Image (cartoon, helix red, strand yellow):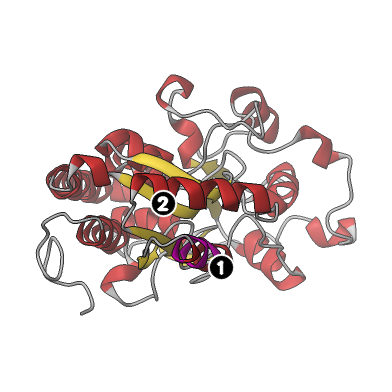
């Protein structure tokens, strides 16, 4: 989506991430009057420019491009799984008070999809940046044929292109800042290109027989496809379903047969199932290390390097390559990773 003022009907014709049936359904028991438009400013009153991003990865894009000209806040915080997040009344009030809402789309914000659709129907601009990309460039979502795999940010080249939609939407919101937004977008795209080069080199240094990435849920398909990793996960694209015991047993067998050296937990997903893999492999005589915690559906703590998109990907690439036998700088691409 690349127009900030697109209507909800146009949105649903062009993109399938938000469900039409939600227009007829109740909004998590919220009375409909609470969804009325926020009051218009009085004549001559300054209109503040503030937006809400659903997840930190989207919020980072908006902040980088806006360069402080627009206040951008993130709704779903550090370490919170967006697949399971359910907005409160206060969250909905924040959405309605914003000038625009930036989302990822493709059902990443699973349980709040209805909320986003109802807010858009009430006249609030909603921009789903991942849905701006052509479907042929995206990976399938086996759980929802009407959506793609939402984890687009795992491929920096795709995320750079998704950022174009955020830039266009911000320019529409604040046309006087067009030149600044254009320059900031170019710098963001350059950082994504540098991340991509680093990831190719780092993952390429892993011995070929060790290029197997085992994670808690299937958030790394774009990453694996871009950098040549075989992927295995305990859960699917969404974390809504419980880990399947038979899937864990099958993965334990693969760990043992392939002599996989490490598996990875995720900061936004409980690590119980990952530790079950380690214990299961150990019981069969194969020692598997916990390679580290990866950022999948959430970034690091706000205010830290890992709390930026650049730091998130740098952390993931460096952690994966090191644990699987690759060669990487001690503190990552920019020397800024926590020791």
**Relative vertical location of residue 212 with respect to residue 297 in this rendering, above or below:** above
Residue 16's tag is none
The residue located at (33%, 77%) in the rendering is 303
Residue 256's tag is 2
Percent from the top left, x then y, of residue 104? 51, 46
The residue located at (18%, 56%) in the rendering is 325
In the figure, residue 162 lies in which quadrant? top left
**Disc on the earlier residue, 2 or 1:** 1
User: Disc 2 or disc 1, which is closer to the eye?
Assistant: 2
- Side (left or right) of 140 relative to 118: left
Percent from the top left, x then y, of residue 92? 71, 63
Secondary structure of the residue carrying numbered label 1: loop
Q: How many marks overall? A: 2
Percent from the top left, x then y, of residue 121? 74, 42
Percent from the top left, x then y, of residue 263? 39, 59
User: Rounded to the nearest whole Å, what is the CA distance between mark 2 and mark 1?
Assistant: 32 Å
- Side (left or right) of 4 relative to 225: right
The residue located at (51%, 63%) in the rendering is 274
Q: Which residues are magenta?
A: 276-282
Residue 172 visible to an observer of this rendering: no
Which residue position holds label 1? 80
């Amino acid at each position: 989506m690349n127009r900030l003022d697109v209507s909800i009907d146009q949105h649903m014709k062009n993109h399938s991430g938000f469900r039409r049936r939600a227009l007829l359904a109740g909004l998590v028991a919220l009375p409909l009057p609470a969804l009325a438009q926020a009051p218009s400013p009085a004549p001559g009153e300054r209109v503040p420019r503030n937006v809400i991003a659903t997840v930190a990865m989207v919020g980072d894009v908006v902040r980088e491009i806006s360069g402080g000209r627009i206040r951008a806040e993130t709704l779903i915080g550090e370490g919170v799984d967006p697949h399971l997040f359910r907005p409160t009344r206060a969250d909905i009030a924040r959405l309605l008070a914003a000038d625009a809402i930036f989302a990822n789309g493709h059902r990443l914000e699973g349980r709040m999809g209805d909320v986003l659709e109802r807010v858009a129907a009430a006249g609030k601009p909603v921009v789903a940046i991942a849905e701006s990309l052509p479907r042929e460039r995206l990976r399938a979502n086996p759980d929802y044929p009407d959506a793609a795999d939402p984890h687009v940010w795992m491929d920096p080249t795709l995320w750079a292109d998704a950022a174009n939609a955020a830039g266009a939407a911000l320019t529409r919101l604040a046309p006087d800042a067009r030149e600044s937004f254009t320059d900031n977008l170019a710098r963001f795209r350059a950082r994504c290109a540098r991340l991509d080069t680093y990831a190719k080199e780092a993952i390429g240094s892993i011995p070929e027989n060790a290029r197997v990435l085992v994670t808690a849920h299937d958030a790394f398909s774009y990453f694996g496809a871009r950098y040549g990793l075989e992927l295995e996960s305990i859960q699917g694209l969404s974390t809504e379903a419980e880990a399947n015991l038979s899937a864990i047993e099958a993965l334990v067998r693969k760990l043992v047969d392939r002599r996989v050296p490490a598996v990875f937990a995720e900061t936004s997903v409980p690590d119980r199932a990952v530790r079950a893999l380690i214990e299961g492999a150990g019981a069969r005589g194969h020692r598997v290390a916990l390679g580290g915690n990866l950022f999948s559906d959430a970034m690091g703590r706000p205010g830290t390097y890992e709390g930026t998109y650049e730091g998130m990907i740098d952390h993931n690439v460096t952690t994966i390559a090191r644990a699987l036998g690759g060669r990487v700088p001690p503190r990552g691409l920019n020397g800024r990773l926590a020791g």
